[in-house]
Amino acid sequence: MNKNGHDIARNFFTSENASSYNNVVKFATFGFDSLWKREMSKLINLDDKCVLDLACGTGIMGSLLLSNKLRMLIGCDLVFEYLLHAKKLGYSLLTNSVAEYLPYKSGTFDVVISSYLVKYANLKLTTEQHWRILKEGGIVIFHDFSYPNNKLIKSLWICYFMILNGIGKILTSWSNAFSELDKVIKESHWTSDLVSELEKQGFISIIKRYYTLGTSAIVYATKPLS
């Protein structure tokens, strides 16, 4: 890819498609998006926690997190128009920024959680920021698509994106994402790269899990107590 991650994300997620994002995610993942997000939210006890929903988008993850007794939920996203939709949900604060340079004080959060971010991010800078803004004992949780290893699933995956590309010709506001997302996923090695960067930063108890026949993955880790 000639474009950097921010350019790709801005090309995929625009002011024109912000209002349709929630429905498109349900459709494009066959409803598995909500399952993956529930799995993320179940990994830890979120009661009385200060949580950063990074790459919060329109707030799908946030609406699920708010069912817990959080002390504070802050959302952050690259695309301002998406935050206008998230604003309706009850976040304590919303911030228009990038994952590599987060405008929060060190040691602010108990949890940093993100979905569909890491394949676009500079993982070295992102994990450095996570380490900085997390309290000791804090948790990071990452989720994104992954390219399956199984030959049969891989063939079905390729066919699915061919269909999605065709649909993008009808849903023109999503044509860029539907035609290029498969390339981004295939060329990303985010799971192994992320684990490596987390280890370099000093995170411990790093766990990687695959879901839905290897088409999605969750990685989470802990900032140790000193």
Image (tube, rainbow, N blue to C red):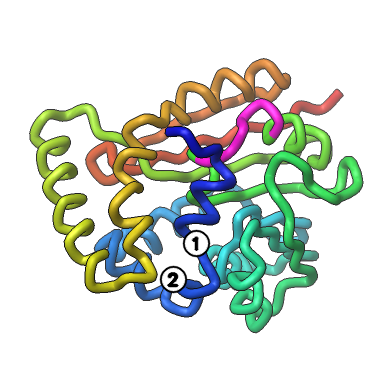
The disc placed on residue 13 is 1
Q: Position of residue 188 (x, y in %)?
A: 41, 31
Label 2 is placed on what type of residue? Tyr
Q: Is residue 78 left or right of residue 10?
A: right
- At 77% from the left and 42% from the top, the residue drawn is 101
Indicate the position of residue 164 as horizontal and vertical percent values. 21, 58
Mark 2 surroundings within 10 Å by alpha-carbon count, few (fewer than 14), some (14 through 19), many (20 or more): some
Task: Tell me the residue at 68%/35% (across/down).
Answer: 126
Is 219 situated above or below 61? above
The three-letter amino acid code for the residue at tag 1 is Phe
* 157 left or right, relative to 172: left
Residue 225 magenta-drawn?
Answer: no
User: Image quadrant of residue 86?
Assistant: bottom right
* Of the two numbered discs 1 and 2 in the rendering, the one whose residue sits closer to the viewer: 1
Above or below, 58 against 184 in this view is below
Q: Residue furthest bottom?
A: 88
Horizontal side, residue 139 vs residue 11: left or right: right
As drawn, is 62 to the left or to the right of 161?
right
Q: Identify which residue, 172 or 147, lies in the foreground.
A: 172
Q: Is the residue under label 2 in contact with that under label 1 (CB below 8 Å)?
A: yes
Question: Quick one: 41 or 18, which is closer to the camera?
Answer: 18
Q: CA distance from mark 1 to mark 2?
A: 9 Å
Location of the C terminus (image quadrant) = top right
Q: Which residues are magenta?
A: 120-125
Residue 25: percent from left, percent from top: 37, 65
Task: List the single residue furthest toward the right.
Answer: 105
What is the quadrant of the N terminus in the image?
top left
Which residue is identified by label 2? 21
Q: Position of residue 38 (x, y in %)?
A: 45, 59
